[in-house]
Image (tube, rainbow, N blue to C red):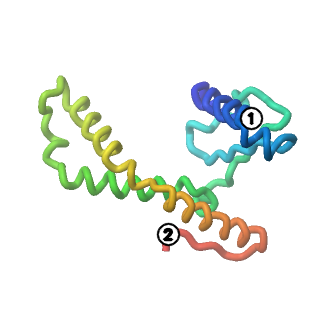
């Protein structure tokens, strides 16, 4: 959790020291959105306070408002397909010292091979989907997810 707070500080410093920030956003707030992942549970208490930093926590069970959720869903589907085609390797130690190490390396390979599925167009599409849902929420309209 301390590592997560340090990462928030890194993001804050990178944003506020950028030329884009200087040119377009001086005097505005830096808003970082957190979901309810266990790693984020103590972020508000651990992060270094800044007058222009806002930590915004999503409500529970609101993946339709968080573009990373659907991007992770796409990534997990790719990883599952990768692993399904290599099921036999899950049960072989191969050249590693343990089954655990063998599986860990296989998962790392699956992640490396699957990461290119997270494209700029996917992220934009999912961000726009979330933006439409934010607008619906502001109007008290029903939202759908996973359909």
Which residue does the image show at 70% across and 27% down from the upper left?
A: 46
Which residue does the image show at 21% across and 33% down from the upper left?
A: 102
Q: How many marks?
A: 2
* 24, 55: nearer the viewer: 24
**Is residue 34 found left or right of 135 in the rendered image?**
left
Dividing the picture into quadrants, the one containing residue 95 is top left
Residue 105 is situated, as x and y percent measured from the top left of the image, at: 26, 34
Q: Which callout, 2 or 1, points to the residue nearer the camera?
A: 1
- Tell me if residue 39 can be seen: yes
**Is residue 109 found left or right of 88 in the rendered image?**
right
Q: Which mark, by number, is residue 71?
A: none
Residue 132 is situated, as x and y percent measured from the top left of the image, at: 66, 70
**Is residue 68 found left or right of 137 in the rendered image?**
left
Q: Secondary structure at mark 1?
A: helix
Q: Secondary structure at mark 2?
A: loop
Q: Residue under label 2, please give it.
A: 146
Mark 2–mark 1 CB contact (< 8 Å): no
Dividing the picture into quadrants, the one containing residue 97 is top left
- Tell me if residue 42 can be seen: no
Which residue does the image show at 78% across and 73% down from the upper left?
A: 139
Q: Which mark, by number, is residue 16?
A: 1
Q: Residues within 10 Å of mark 2 (few under 14, many from 20)?
A: few
Q: Residues within 10 Å of mark 1 (few under 14, many from 20)?
A: some
* 2 or 1: tag closer to the N-terminus: 1
Alpha-carbon distance for marks 2 and 1? 36 Å
Residue 10 is situated, as x and y percent measured from the top left of the image, at: 64, 30
Whether 98 is drawn above or below 22: the answer is above
Whether 136 is drawn above or below 79: the answer is below
- Quadrant for the N terminus in the image: top right
Residue 120 is situated, as x and y percent measured from the top left of the image, at: 51, 56
Which residue does the image show at 39% across and 48% down from the upper left?
A: 115
């Amino acid at each position: 959790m301390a590592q997560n707070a340090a990462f928030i500080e890194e993001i804050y410093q990178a944003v506020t020291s950028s030329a884009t920030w200087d040119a377009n956003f001086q005097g505005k707030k830096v808003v970082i959105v957190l979901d309810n992942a266990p790693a984020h549970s103590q972020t508000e208490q651990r992060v270094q306070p800044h007058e222009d930093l806002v930590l915004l926590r999503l409500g529970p069970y609101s993946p339709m408002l968080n573009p990373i959720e659907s991007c992770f869903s796409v990534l997990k589907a790719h990883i599952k397909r990768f692993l399904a085609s290599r099921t036999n390797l899950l049960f072989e130690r191969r050249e590693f010292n343990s089954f655990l190490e063998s599986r860990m390396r296989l998962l790392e390979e699956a992640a490396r091979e699957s990461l290119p599925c997270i494209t700029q167009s996917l992220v934009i599409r999912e961000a726009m989907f979330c933006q439409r849902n934010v607008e619906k929420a502001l109007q008290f309209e029903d939202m759908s997810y996973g359909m």
